[in-house]
Image (cartoon, rainbow, N blue to C red):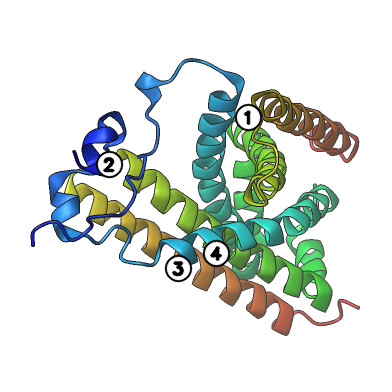
Amino acid sequence: MSKNDLFQPQQFRTPLSRARGMGASRHGVSHFITERVSGLALAPLSIWGVFAALKLIGADQQTAAAWVSQPVNAVLLGLLLISALIHLSNAVQVVIEDYVHRFTSKSALVIGNLFVCVLAGAVGIFSILKVALTVTGAH
Amino acid sequence: MTDTSRGLPERPMSPHLQVWRWHITMACSILHRGCVVGLWVGAVILAGWAAALAAGSDAYAGYVGLLGSPIGKLVLLGETFAVFFNIAYTIRQTFWDTGKGFQPRVADMTGAMAIAFAVVATIVTWVIAHANGAF
């Protein structure tokens, strides 16, 4: 009797996954740690983000731009956006991989998730820098 | 040799909705997944806000007008809850990573605490938003 016969009810791996023997291709641990560390970074950053949002209620474009052009705000806003996108692209990828099983749909969604997050990061950071570096007379 | 993973322990798959009994720890897990997907949208909204800010007064006024509409406010209310629940859940997971908090009673309690924290923090945030003239 092999070990696998003893643990029959706990067998979850399919014959195909056994044949491939790849699992998460050995990047599972780095994915897990990235998600945890970015999550921890987000705890203070997102609380700051809520305070910032409350502060900017009712502000017009000039006021908001002047706020973003302050170095501390620009840097924290950039950190918030990047940490959030790293955290959420990883987290949403896990959700997709858990619930979408067809190879083509799953791959399309995983790639789409990555593209949207990278695009949001590029647009967001460019915009923050543009405002921070072009607004004058804010101080 | 066809079985390249011989000798490795069997790994459980992620639990699925249909095979789970309704319970606070399960509800927290599902709620967290929902919040994560919601926050993904929220991060895109934040990037859009920065783009509108960089695009000028008209674009910014239009974007903020969208966020201030009834549907926009409802989305932001959900995002507020998701932000706070994600913070509490991350702290809960960090304790799990150190091997603490797995006893059923403790896991139930920290789950309930995470939801309670998110609800209270959301209410406080929106009371302040109201005082700041959000609505």
Evaluate whether label 4 is on the same chain as label 2. Answer: yes
Between marks 4 and 1 in the image, the one whose residue lies nearer the viewer: 4
Mark-to-mark CA distance, 4 and 1 = 36 Å
Q: Residues within 10 Å of mark 2 (few under 14, many from 20)?
A: some
Question: Which residue in the protein does label 3 denote?
Answer: A118
Mark-to-mark CA distance, 4 and 2 = 22 Å
Q: Secondary structure at mark 2?
A: loop
Q: In the rendered structure, which disc, 3 or 2, sits on the residue that comes first in sequence?
A: 2
- Asked if B102 appears above or below A102 in the picture, the reply is above
**Mark 3 — on which chain does it sit?**
A
* Residue A109 image offset from top left, x and y in percent: 30, 52
Whether residue B59 appears in this view of the structure is no
| Horizontal arrangement in the rendering, residue A72 relative to residue A82 (left or right) | right
Question: Which residue in the protein does label 1 denote?
Answer: B70
Q: Secondary structure at mark 1?
A: helix
At label 2, the amino acid type is Val
Evaluate whether label 3 is on the same chain as label 2. Answer: yes
Between marks 3 and 1 in the image, the one whose residue lies nearer the viewer: 3
Residue drawn at (67%, 70%) of the image: A78
Q: Secondary structure at mark 3?
A: helix
Residue drawn at (18%, 38%) of the image: A1
Q: Residues within 10 Å of mark 3 (few under 14, many from 20)?
A: some
Q: Secondary structure at mark 4?
A: helix
Mark-to-mark CA distance, 3 and 1 = 29 Å
* Disc on res. A44: none
Comparing A32 with B76, the one in front is A32
Q: In the rendered structure, which disc, 3 or 4, sits on the residue that comes first in sequence?
A: 4
Between marks 1 and 2 in the image, the one whose residue lies nearer the viewer: 2
